[in-house]
Amino acid sequence: MRARRLTRTLTCIAALSLAAAGCGLSGGSDNGDATAGGCKVDKGNVGSGKLTGDVKGQITFQTTNLKKDFGDFFNGVIKSFEKAHPGAKVKWIDDPGDNTFTQRTVADAQACTMPDVINVNAPTATTLTKAGYLLDLSVKDPDVAKPFVPSFWKSATFKDASGKAIHTTLPWYTGGVLLTYNKDLLKKAGVDPAEPPTTLFGLFADYEKVAKAGKGKFYATMANPIWRIPSDFDQMNIKMLSADGKSAVFADDPRTTQWVAWMAKLYKEGAMPKDSLSSSNDPSTLYSQGKVAYGSTNPSFVRFVQQNSPSVYDKTAVGQQPYDALGRASAGAPQYISVAATSKHAPVALAFAEYLTNAENQTAWCKDPKVVIFPTTTASLSDPFFQNVTGSDPFSQARKLVADQLKTADTNQTNLSPAVQNAIVGQVQLAMQGKKSPAQAVKDAQAKADELLKQAG
């Protein structure tokens, strides 16, 4: 489903190593030249000082897999921007957003041909920032942070070549988390749908009740731990990586072993379909068939059920995902908009990036009936569209619940490379199958993660 793809966190490729000669920013030489990532650029694009210059010239704006469904909206934004700035032109291109996105974007950056304004995810922003290819937005416009929810603005920092965290992205759209559950199945298991658990282990205890009541006819959730790592650990406030991100530390917390022990117990007792342990499928299909009590935590999932299984939708309710030790929702990283430091018309690019992500345009896009996303500006989240919810249906309640929690949500999601994530998941799967003790699985998972982190540098 389109909305589910749109809001899914992109767990992309590990950061690519870039040629040392192409990294970093340098100030202007005697002739006024400057470099960004090895590309010659206008001196005003780098170093200290606010970006100045006329908003004139043509730029390229790149999104990720949006043109088919949202062409009218973005063409309208571009047209209104060009009307406000008669000397500016915006050419819109759309990338498919496949598994080679980061590699292709880095290759464009190294060739000094990266789009002026580009939609990036956290892994791509990490790589491009370290290599010096993105504009330091808070330096080039000191007022740029004002519209955004503080936690989302905080998430928009990435480290440059020196290790300093700088704002090279504007937070754009995001998802959210909640509990989606089948009230009838919970009642059969003796779980009160009106009293969602406040901890993940409390949720696991409810899973256990569902397993005992379901007896293989219905289940609590899906088994593959890839859907829960690192999100569960983040919500439990289990530190997964060292401060410098170069080593794994999650085995130091005894709750990690307790979590794995719970997963193994639940799998053995039938809380999860046996064939879902290594499946890449999320709960959508089985939930829509009334065979799984808990659905996806993505709010767009509620719309999916509404459209594809009305009978199950009538039995569906939503609740707050357990805050657990974190004490607030963990929203994960949003999608971002960045401005290329290599842009030949950086004043146009920065002006357009800020225009695209302002409260008015964010709110307008979130109201599009084809999408289930949430904005990152304070004014947008306070809009009556999110706050004046009159319907008691699950989808209306989900929209208000997530909009409320995003105002204070934690966005510091642990950023694991696919290789590290898969290594951890693989060890948890062995414990769930009874092939390793939970303690040994956690110990081995940390060792494997450490080895991979060491290789990545």
Image (spheres, rainbow, N blue to C red):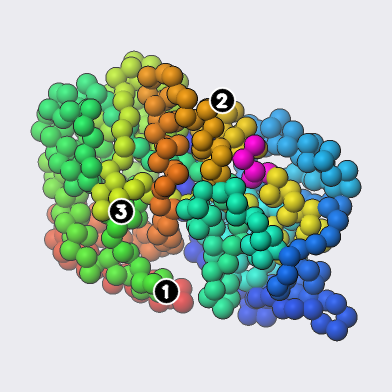
Q: Calculate the distance from the C-alpha at mark 2 to the C-alpha at mark 1.
A: 42 Å
| Residue 281 on image: x %, y % | 37, 39
Q: Is residue 441 visible?
A: no
- The residue range painted magenta reads 356-360
**In the rendered image, the vertical position of residue 383 relative to residue 229, given as above or below:** above
Q: Is residue 28 left or right of residue 121?
A: right
| Residue 33 on image: x %, y % | 83, 76
Secondary structure found at label 3: helix
**In the rendered image, the vertical position of residue 162 relative to residue 357, given as above or below:** below
Q: Residues within 10 Å of mark 2 (few under 14, many from 20)?
A: few
Q: Residue at x 64, y 37 (%)?
A: 360
Q: Which residue is mark 3?
A: 326
**Are dots 3 and 1 in contact, CB under 8 Å?**
no
Chief secondary structure of the magenta span? helix
Q: Which residue is mark 2?
A: 369
> Does residue 153 belong to the magenta stretch?
no
Q: Is residue 90 left or right of residue 312?
A: right
Which residue occupies the foreground of this view, 347 or 292? 347
Which residue occupies the foreground of this view, 149 or 247? 149
| Residue 291 on image: x %, y % | 26, 27
Q: Calculate the distance from the C-alpha at mark 2 to the C-alpha at mark 3.
A: 33 Å
Q: Residue at x 42, y 37 (%)?
A: 404
Q: Which residue is mark 1?
A: 244
Q: Is residue 343 left or right of residue 297?
A: right
Q: Residues within 10 Å of mark 3 (few under 14, many from 20)?
A: some
Residue type marked 1: Asp
Q: Calculate the distance from the C-alpha at mark 3 to the C-alpha at mark 1.
A: 21 Å
Q: Which badge, 2 or 3, comes first in the chain's sequence?
A: 3
Q: Which badge, 2 or 1, comes first in the chain's sequence?
A: 1
Which residue occupies the foreground of this view, 98 or 408? 408
Q: Is residue 147 visible?
A: yes
